[in-house]
Image (tube, rainbow, N blue to C red):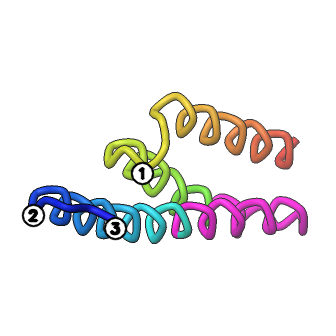
Amino acid sequence: MANTSSAKKATRKIARRAATNKTRRSRVRTYVRKVEEALAAGDKSAAEAAFLAAQPELMRAATKGVIHKNTASRKVSRLAQRLKTLSV
């Protein structure tokens, strides 16, 4: 347990940030899952719409520091690749 007032405040800040990051990470996973479900179903129009919604969400998470920038870029790239193969 924290003893000093500054340490107590730091633990409160960490808890707040962790809750915010958890919410953001969950939101990103939801958007990515919607794209993957549409891809699995073979629904191209739904997959494109879901991808267009998921892409800024992934980049926003990277900007906020929830996930690494390269991780977000990799996920967007792989989803785009799968979307492209669906149309062929």
The residue segment tinted magenta is: 27-48
Q: Circle 2 is placed at which residue position?
A: 5
Q: What amino acid does circle 3 point to? A: Ala
Q: Earlier in the sequence, mark 2 or mark 3?
A: 2
Which residue does the image show at 41% across and 61% down from the upper left? 21
What x and y, as percent, mark residue 48? 65, 58
Q: Residue 64, relative to residue 81: is it above or below?
A: below
Q: Main secondary structure of the magenta part?
A: helix
In the foreground, 46 or 65: 65
Which residue does the image show at 61% across and 56% down from the upper left? 51
Q: Circle 3 is placed at which residue position?
A: 15
Residue at mark 2 to residue at mark 3: CA–CA distance: 16 Å
Q: Circle 1 is placed at which residue position?
A: 61
What x and y, as percent, mark residue 25? 52, 61
Q: What amino acid does circle 2 point to? A: Ser
Q: Earlier in the sequence, mark 1 or mark 2?
A: 2
Q: What amino acid does circle 1 point to? A: Ala
Which element is circle 1 on?
helix
Q: Residue 50, relative to residue 74: is it above or below?
A: below
In the foreground, 30 or 66: 66
Is 41 colored magenta in this rendering?
yes
Q: Residue 21, relative to residue 62: is it above or below?
A: below
Left or right: where does residue 29 sit relative to residue 43? left
Residue at mark 1 to residue at mark 3: CA–CA distance: 18 Å
Is 26 colored magenta in this rendering?
no
In the foreground, 37 or 62: 62
Q: Number of callouts in the render?
A: 3
Residue 22 circle label: none
Q: Earlier in the sequence, mark 1 or mark 3?
A: 3
Left or right: where does residue 15 sit relative to residue 76? left
**Discs 2/3, front:** 2
